[in-house]
């Protein structure tokens, strides 16, 4: 059976140890052959193969042909040339201060200098040390002492043209841990100063490739890198990270068959389950969807369906962010400009969720030069794990208590008991922490209700449009329909009157199901439900 990698992030180790490599080198060649440029940035969620791609570039430019036997790029590449490679992996840069980050950079640059056979020149400033390293590798490759350096085993001495290759993995990791803190601007400025070296020495670089989770807008870190091409949403590389359906079937036929046998299905039935759980990521509106590679590998390794990616990749800063600004998951639309980038001081939640992999492109609308993307959860794994985490943040209860209340709410709907359903929600909201409830408005309470209903498997709609307005929440079961209107510092009676005055019930009349109106009032002062009114529609 094929060996699916789950914890190997270097191309050389993966190939030498016999793990399955899904061949992406035909796409990589489009980036390295100079036809599209030579400086690229691509943002992708964590655990999506960014480090493996960086490692593959490194082996390619260092001329390790044996590792590429049988791959698409092997007969197309000029293996007589080699380039010095500076590989900076920021993935472990979890520093508390900028001073710690600068020491981290200098240590990493020192290691890269040693690996490339040049002396490390450091005056205490990591940006200057970075500049010195690029200059020294360039000079070594271009000097008349190339033959002497070659005897010493220097990679730089065998350069294909004197220029340097720079590969930066997880460029944004030092900053992500400080979002929403007073240190965010300080870290942003430090990254900008460090990466600005790449602009000043652009002519000495054969190839530059930068990856990360987030894209910060042009006015900050990347403002100096005018020639850096952002390919995050480019169709040419939309399937570079993750596996297409064809790639899964082609590269893992035995694993699919074995997994199907474990599930009591054929291989195609097993594949359908994998698609439901781990597929759905789309990085261009016209591109194929891709399967999360880590989740697929973990599934084949364990022969179980589980929330693999979310267990290893849930950023705590996301949950902290939504404590302050509850997410309205019923409205996940964003402009093209907002989808691409944000600033660390001004976080846009939907943009952040797209870039971290919790949302993906589901559709778009084009109006003249303006484009609006409609986003959604890519698959069951992401939706279930994210909403459960979000519910925990909102209700401030442990998993057992939250599950028990959720179960009672679900059973109340199944037994057509709206009073018991509302009572379960009272318990949810009574437990919401003071620091969360003291900052909320009407829409926030509505968003929290929507998340709780979604996570317990209820067919819920939010901000549902009608010809006379928008319904806050709708719930539909096999037998009944419920219309819920939320009011803050008002009365449940007024909520019911709004439903009736605007004829919200018209939306459900064609279904023939009994309709129940639920008005819920929240009190800012009491920070909980202050009134409920339930009316059976005539």
Image: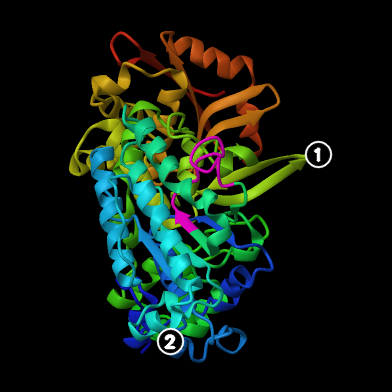
Which residue sits at x=30%, y=23%? 436
Q: Identify the residue at image location x=42%, y=24%.
A: 444
In the displayed orientation, state which residue is furthest to the front.
144
Q: Position of residue 421 (x, y in %)?
A: 35, 32
Residue 454 in the image, given as x and y percentages of width and height: 42, 42
Residue 167 figure quarter: bottom left
**Could you say which is closer to the camera, residue 419 or residue 158?**
158
Considering only vertical position in the picture, is 501 above or below 274?
A: above
Q: Main secondary structure of the magenta part?
A: loop
Look at the image and tell me in which quarter the N terminus lies: bottom left
Q: Is 327 situated above or below 208?
A: above
- For the residue carrying disc 1, how many other residues have a C-alpha within 10 Å: few (<14), some (14-19), or many (20+)? few
Queried whether the magenta region covers residue 213, the answer comes back as: yes
Tell me what residue is drawn at x 43 percent, y 77 percent: 145
In the rendered structure, are the residues bearing label 1 and label 2 in contact, judged by CB atoms less than 8 Å apart? Answer: no
Instruction: List the residue tagged with mark 2.
Output: 67
Asked whether 525 falls inside the magenta stretch, the response is no
Could you tell whether 367 is left or right of 375 in the image?
right
Which of the 4 image quarters holds residue 255?
bottom left
Using the image, determine if residue 50 lies above or below residue 63: above
Tell me the crowding category of disc 2: few under 14, some 14 to 19, or many 20 or more residues within 10 angstroms, Cα based: some
Q: Nearer the viewer, residue 297 or 524?
A: 297
Q: Is residue 288 left or right of residue 44?
A: right
Number of the label disc, if any, that sits on residue 368: 1
Residue 291 visible somewhere in the drawing: no
Give the magenta range: 210-225
């Amino acid at each position: 059976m094929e060996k699916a990698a789950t914890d190997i992030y270097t191309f050389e180790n993966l190939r030498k140890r016999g793990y399955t490599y899904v061949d992406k080198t035909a796409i990589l060649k489009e980036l390295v052959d100079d036809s599209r440029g030579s400086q690229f940035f691509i943002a992708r969620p964590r655990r999506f193969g960014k480090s493996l791609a960086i490692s593959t570039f490194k082996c390619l430019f260092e001329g390790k042909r044996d590792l590429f036997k049988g791959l698409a790029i092997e007969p197309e590449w000029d293996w007589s040339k080699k380039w010095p490679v500076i590989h900076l992996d920021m993935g472990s840069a979890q520093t508390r201060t900028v001073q710690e980050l600068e020491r981290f950079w200098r240590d990493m640059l020192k290691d890269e200098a040693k690996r490339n056979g040049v002396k490390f020149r450091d005056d205490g400033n990591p940006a200057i040390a970075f500049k010195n390293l690029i200059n020294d590798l360039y000079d070594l490759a271009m000097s008349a002492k190339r033959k002497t350096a070659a005897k010493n085993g220097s990679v730089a001495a065998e350069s294909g043209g004197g220029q340097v290759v720079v590969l930066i993995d997880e460029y944004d990791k030092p900053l992500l841990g400080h979002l929403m803190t007073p240190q965010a601007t300080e870290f942003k400025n430090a990254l900008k100063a460090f990466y600005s070296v790449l602009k000043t020495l652009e002519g000495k670089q054969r190839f530059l490739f930068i990856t990360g989770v987030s894209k910060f807008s042009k006015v900050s870190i990347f403002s100096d890198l005018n020639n850096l091409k952002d390919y995050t949403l480019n169709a040419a590389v939309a399937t570079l990270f993750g596996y297409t359906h064809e790639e899964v079937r082609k590269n893992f036929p035995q694993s699919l068959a074995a997994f199907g046998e474990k599930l009591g299905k054929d291989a195609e039935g097993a594949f359908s389950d994998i698609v439901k759980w781990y597929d759905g990521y789309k990085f261009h509106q016209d591109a194929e969807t891709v399967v999360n590679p880590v989740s697929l590998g973990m599934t084949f390794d364990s022969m179980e369906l589980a929330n693999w990616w979310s267990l290893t990749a849930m950023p705590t800063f996301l949950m902290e962010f939504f404590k302050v600004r509850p997410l309205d998951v019923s409205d996940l639309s964003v402009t093209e400009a907002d989808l691409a980038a944000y600033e660390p001081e001004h976080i846009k939640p939907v943009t952040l969720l797209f870039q971290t992999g919790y949302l993906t492109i589901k559709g778009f609308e084009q109006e003249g030069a303006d484009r609006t993307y409609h986003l959604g959860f890519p698959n069951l794994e992401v939706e279930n794990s994210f909403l459960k985490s979000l519910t925990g943040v909102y209700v401030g209860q442990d998993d057992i208590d939250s599950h028990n209340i959720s179960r009672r709410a679900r059973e109340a709907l199944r037994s057509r008991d709206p009073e018991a359903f509302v009572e379960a929600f009272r318990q949810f909201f009574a437990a919401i922490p003071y620091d969360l409830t003291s900052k909320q408005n009407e829409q926030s309470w509505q968003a929290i209700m929507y998340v709780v209903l979604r996570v317990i498997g209820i067919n819920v709609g939010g901000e549902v449009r009608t010809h006379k307005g928008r319904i806050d929440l709708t719930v539909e079961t096999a037998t009944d329909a419920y219309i819920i209107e939320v009011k803050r510092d008002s009365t449940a009676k007024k909520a019911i009157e709004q439903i009736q005055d605007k004829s919200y019930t018209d939306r459900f009349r064609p279904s023939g199901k009994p309709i129940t109106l639920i008005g819920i009032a929240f009190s800012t002062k009491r920070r909980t439900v202050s009134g409920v009114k339930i009316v059976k529609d005539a």
